[in-house]
Image: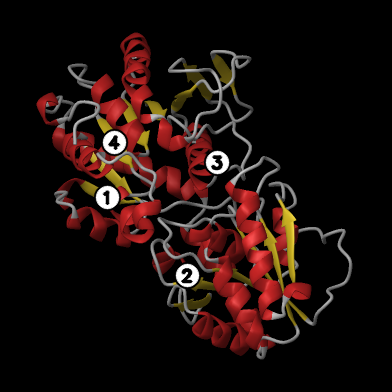
Amino acid sequence: MQVALVSEHASPLAALGAVDAGGQNVHVAELASGLTRLGHVVVVYTRRDDANLPETVRTDDGYDVVHLAAGPSRSVPKDDLWPLMPTFADALRRHLRARTPDVVHAHFWMSGWAATRATRGLSIPTFVTFHALGSVKRRHQGSADTSPPERVEVELAVARRATGVVATCRDEVAELAAIGVDLDGVDVVPCGVDVRHFTPDAAPLDDPPQREPYRIVSVGRLVPRKGYATIVEALVALPGVELVVAGGHAGAGSVEAEQLRLEALAAELGVADRVHFVGQVGHFLMPALLCSADLVVCSPWYEPFGLVPLEAMACGVPVVASAVGGMLDSVADGETGRLVPPQDPAALGVAVAELLADPALRRAYGRAGVRRARSRYSWDAVATATAEVYDRVLAAHGTSDHDAARLPALGTA
């Protein structure tokens, strides 16, 4: 099968940790690699964000990345890309007409809009994975949400026009239903984890001894919604526990502002000496960092899926996570970790304290986490399940094109 993956802002070649580079980049890269290992021919289409990039890059994993010209050949904030999507869609259409893949699978709402526009009249089945929904972002961020105002309407139109929607968790299915998506066309395939890289046998960090008896680690972009403030507040009731936060980048802007905010909060609460920001930790070293922890804590306000809990589980480290989004599926409460209400420092502190006080329980959770990650969430399993969705939906619905009139034009509200 020839598969075209479309990911307008999240290139599989991008360095992780920047404001707009995270779990979606990993998902697209690993899905492309997994599908390639299964024998499929995969091309990833993304926007050119650097004038020095070649049009096509053949990756070491055997799939191609094609850079489409749409707007300036430089980095553009994700939420500013919407006006560029007609140009992106037109460039994508030219490539799809030339290569005629069997399946197009778009990632994120703008890619979904571009892909369904680009495949109009071409009879190419088109799937979409949203990764995050505008309705959820708007609910949690309110006036701080910088998404284009028509995002939610476009997501609904894309979901209705696509051949199928591939959601990443059950919580996303409920959110799709809430905005009016017919669930008959929705399948669930989770995100995954590289179980060959993330293992309990990771080499030890070249790291000084813990300053405190216990270490908790939290990983992700330094933005308020990731909920690091909740962990800092919980530390007040957790003497002898240090927090290591990995994330951020060297550029100026909100990332540095968020670290300053958290450092000020830690100082105000008297726990600054137990909060350590280590910046970006590369993919190669991440297993060692996770394995250095007694617990990995993931405390976002909301999370469309969340890869870090899977990475921690694959490393045999128990997880304490917010009971939101994909973590409701991935973290087995009372088996591989604990789920707690978001933005609740007291509940988080109790869960952490109980696990730190019981080494045998932590070991049992760690072993269960490894089994769960390997059996359910390897990228090979995810790629296989995704290919099965393609095959099943194509067999049931054929390859007829949907009604293009239902796709709203750029700029409609």
Q: Position of residue 163 (x, y in %)?
A: 21, 35
Q: Position of residue 346 (x, y in %)?
A: 52, 85
**Disc 3 versus disc 2: distance between alpha carbons?**
24 Å
Q: Which residue is mark 2?
A: 331
Is residue 89 positioned above or below 318 on the image?
above
Q: Which residue is mark 3?
A: 21
Q: Which residue is mark 1?
A: 187
Residue mark closest to the camera, 4 vs 3: 3
**Disc 4 versus disc 3: distance between alpha carbons?**
22 Å
**Camera-nearest residue between 13 and 84:** 84
Q: Are marks 3 and 1 in contact (CB under 8 Å)?
A: no
Q: Which residue is mark 4?
A: 127
**Please, what is the three-letter code of the amino acid marked with disc 4?**
Phe
Q: Residues within 10 Å of mark 3 (few under 14, many from 20)?
A: some
For mark 1, give the secondary structure.
Answer: strand
Q: Toward which corner of the image does residue 341 lie, by quadrant? A: bottom left
Q: Position of residue 374 (x, y in %)?
A: 54, 59
**Please, what is the three-letter code of the amino acid marked with disc 1?**
Asp
